């Protein structure tokens, strides 16, 4: 353009320096009309004149075209510097000034991706504004027409308009209804309603302070007026009563109070004014186990859910009443004839009062004391026929009753055998009951038994296995042989093991004498262990015709001495062994010309004493007190009892012999406690077991100083043991 203008200017300069008075071209090539300016082309028109006229007739042509290639500048800038002046003025003589169509367009703006027209200030349109696309953004203006919709009437095209609602139609749009007299609380968007349920059939109260007979009452609305309620207040609260006697007084046919906790415990607290927290008592239901507890600072009483058990000092009572005390007395009664009354009607095994000690030795399950002159620590009474006022049962090594002082019997004592002891003499000691145990019942076992006490204080027994013809031993696991026993077979070579006798050698191991019926020999086995389970040595001592039971003991020289019978009728013999296993140096002596089933022991004087029976004169029990260690001279023979056999002898803690034997007439087990060292006087005879036919007894003294007897129960084919309660083996024996 500038080049064109330059060319035109050059042509004009050929004729003159200026084209007209108001048109000038300066030396820089700027063209000015009117007042000179710094622009490249400036046109100034006077009033009603067109400063620049641009015309274009071709498609896509532009009368005036401005373009700018730098961001922020203008391709065409129109600027109005005074009111009512226009920087750009578009005008069309027909059609719309801003409409692009068949008519002329005063101003046309086009943008492929930006704004076709951008107005940063206010924009005014005096004519109509036609928009073919969407109008985006808020538009301020008047609503010129409102039409009524469904259920509405009215409307208008200018000014304020009114819409009238069709109430009949609106009521039909509610999807549900409420009961007669009930109000609607809420209409939901879907047409459903929420009714007010508590005003059905009621009358609105107009004056809530007025009602008849409501003085001191909390009034009650009956639907039409206030009437007397059930809560009365005159300082005390009464429910169901007009004369409450306490702060809360409830009267009803079956009054109940419910305290319900939604979480944790439901609780009532009891407090006196001024109490500290530790002095407050609480009655509460434990939510963790449903127990009811009365509690104060660690002190508690529990009523257990499900069982009804009551615990004092314990959270989990296992009995109807369980009292746990950290110290002091658990239960104490005073002021009446009976401090504690335990009662039961459910059977013999039930206990009215049960005292139990769990603390170990020397503990006391129940303690009864009396401090008065004629007081009774415990009073036991039975009024029914055959009833027992007091039943006491002792442990295996304990006492059924242990009395530190005198015991007075008013009406007498009835013993198991039916005898009655009258109260002429006070009882000073209450014995323990005998304990009978089956040790071995595998076949026909237990004949020809013999017993002694090992170095561990426990019994060891030798006996004959009749089913197999063997010699066996039983090493007991406790003092009564009731558990932990070890059974061993020592000799099974032929028919062996009858007429056995056992003792403990100086080495602490058992040594046993017995008969070999196959060869009619006297044999000795020296055990290799305390239970004779291994290392045993078997020796033949006398190959003569042994026809009687044997008995063995240890002399004061530490060597065995054996009594036995040889021949028919047998004579009583003694074999004094030369060594611990009787394998050499033995001395054999005939003590009596007739004697069967002998038993030998050593008296306190160090000399043997032998019990046996002589059947040629009618089964007479005899005792031979030896005059020397081998019984070769100075022997004294005494008759103890008649009609008896199968003897066994030992020395009691008092130094006197005690003998067990078989009662031939009554088939009973008997014990004879000798009155002196030779059993010549002062002997006491006792029946120990009369329940079966008993043979082959053996006796020794336990660590408690009382006899222990093993014997064969021929009725049942069993080996049995009796632990005597006293030195006489008397049940319920009394020392006077």
Image (cartoon, grey):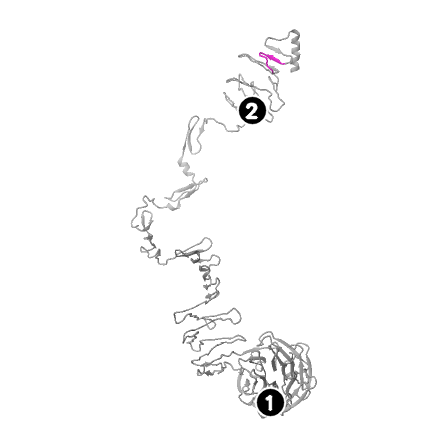
Tell me if mark 1 has few (under 14), some (14-19) or many (20+) residues whose alpha carbon lies within 10 angstroms of its own: many
Find residue 721 and report its horizontal and vertical position in percent. 57, 79
Determine the secondary structure under disc 2: loop
Closer to us: mark 1 or mark 2?
A: 1
Determine whether, in the image, residue 482 is placed left or right of residue 253: right
Quick one: 140 or 659, which is closer to the camera?
659
Quick one: label 2, few (<14), some, or many (20+) residues within 10 Å?
A: few
Q: Is residue 579 above or below residue 337?
A: below
Does the magenta portion include 31?
Answer: yes
Range of the magenta residues? Answer: 30-38
Residue 710 visible in image: no
Q: Main secondary structure of the magenta part?
A: loop
Residue 154 point in image, percent of width and height: 41, 30
Sequence order check, earlier mark of 1 and 2: 2
Q: Which mark is residue 118?
A: 2
- Label 1: which residue? 624
């Amino acid at each position: 353009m500038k080049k064109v203008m330059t060319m035109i200017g050059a042509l004009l300069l050929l004729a003159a320096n200026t084209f007209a008075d108001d048109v000038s071209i300066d030396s820089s090539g700027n063209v000015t009309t009117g007042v000179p300016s710094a622009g490249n082309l400036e046109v100034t028109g006077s009033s009603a004149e067109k400063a620049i006229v641009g015309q274009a007739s071709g498609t896509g042509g532009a009368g005036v075209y401005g373009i700018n290639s730098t961001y922020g500048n203008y391709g065409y800038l129109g600027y109005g510097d005074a009111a009512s002046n226009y920087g750009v003025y578009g005008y069309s003589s027909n059609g719309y000034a801003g409409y692009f169509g068949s008519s002329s367009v005063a101003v046309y703006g086009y943008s492929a991706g930006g704004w076709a027209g951008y107005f940063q200030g206010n924009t005014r349109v005096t004519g109509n504004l036609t928009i073919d696309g969407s109008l985006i953004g808020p538009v301020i203006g008047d609503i010129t027409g409102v039409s009524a919709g469904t259920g509405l009437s009215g409307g208008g095209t200018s000014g304020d308009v009114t819409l009238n609602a069709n109430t009949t139609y609106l009521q039909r749009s509610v999807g549900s209804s409420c009961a007669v007299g009930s109000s609607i609380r809420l209409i939901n968007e879907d047409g459903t309603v929420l009714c007010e349920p508590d005003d059905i059939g009621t009358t609105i109260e107009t004056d809530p302070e007025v009602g008849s007979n409501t003085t001191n009452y909390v009034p009650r609305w009956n639907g039409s007026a206030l009437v007397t309620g059930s809560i009365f207040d005159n300082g005390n609260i009464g429910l169901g009563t007009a004369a409450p006697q306490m702060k809360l007084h409830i009267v009803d046919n079956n009054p109940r109070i419910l305290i319900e906790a939604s979480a944790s415990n439901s609780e009532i607290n009891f407090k006196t004014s001024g109490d500290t927290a530790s002095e407050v008592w609480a009655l509460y239901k434990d939510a963790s186990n449903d127990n009811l507890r009365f509690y104060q600072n660690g002190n508690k009483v529990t009523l257990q859910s499900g069982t009804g058990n009551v615990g004092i000092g314990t959270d989990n009572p296992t009995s109807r009443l369980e009292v746990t005390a950290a110290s002091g007395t658990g239960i104490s009664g005073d002021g009446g004839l009976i401090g504690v009354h335990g009662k039961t009607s459910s059977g013999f095994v039930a206990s009215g009062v049960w005292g139990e000690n769990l603390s170990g030795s020397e503990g006391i399950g129940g303690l009864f004391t009396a401090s008065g002159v004629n007081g009774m620590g415990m009073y036991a009474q039975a009024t029914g026929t055959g009833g027992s006022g007091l039943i006491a049962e002792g442990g295996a090594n304990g006492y059924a009753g242990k009395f530190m002082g005198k015991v007075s019997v008013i009406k007498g004592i009835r013993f198991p055998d039916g005898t009655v002891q009258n109260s002429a003499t006070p009882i000073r000691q209450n014995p323990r009951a005998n304990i009978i145990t089956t040790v071995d019942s595998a076949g026909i076992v237990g004949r020809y038994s013999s017993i002694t006490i090992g170095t561990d204080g426990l019994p060891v027994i030798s006996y004959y296995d009749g089913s197999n013809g063997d010699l066996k031993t039983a090493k007991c696991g406790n003092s009564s042989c009731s558990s932990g026993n070890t059974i061993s077979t020592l000799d099974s070579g032929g028919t062996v093991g009858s007429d056995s006798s056992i003792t403990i050698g100086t080495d602490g191991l058992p040594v046993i004498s017995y008969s070999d019926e196959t060869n009619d020999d006297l044999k000795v086995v020296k055990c290799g262990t305390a239970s004779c389970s291994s290392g045993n040595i078997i020796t033949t001592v006398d190959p003569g015709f042994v026809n009687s039971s044997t008995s063995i003991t240890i002399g004061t020289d530490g060597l065995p001495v054996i009594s036995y019978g040889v021949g028919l009728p047998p004579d009583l013999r003694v074999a004094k062994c030369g060594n611990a296993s009787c394998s050499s140096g033995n001395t054999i002596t005939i003590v009596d010309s007739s004697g069967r089933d002998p038993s030998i022991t050593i008296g306190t004087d160090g000399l043997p004493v032998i019990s046996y029976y002589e059947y040629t004169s009618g089964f007479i029990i005899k005792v031979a007190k030896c005059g020397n260690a081998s019984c070769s001279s100075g022997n004294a023979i005494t008759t103890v009892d008649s009609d008896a056999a199968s003897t066994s002898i030992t020395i009691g803690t008092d130094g006197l012999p005690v003998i067990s034997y078989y009662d031939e007439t009554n088939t009973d087990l008997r014990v004879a406690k000798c009155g002196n060292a030779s059993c010549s006087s002062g002997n006491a005879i006792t029946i120990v077991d009369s329940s079966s036919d008993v043979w082959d007894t053996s006796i020794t003294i336990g660590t408690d100083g009382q006899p222990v007897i093993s014997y064969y129960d021929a009725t049942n084919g069993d080996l049995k043991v009796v632990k005597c309660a006293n030195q006489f083996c008397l049940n319920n024996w009394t020392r006077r």
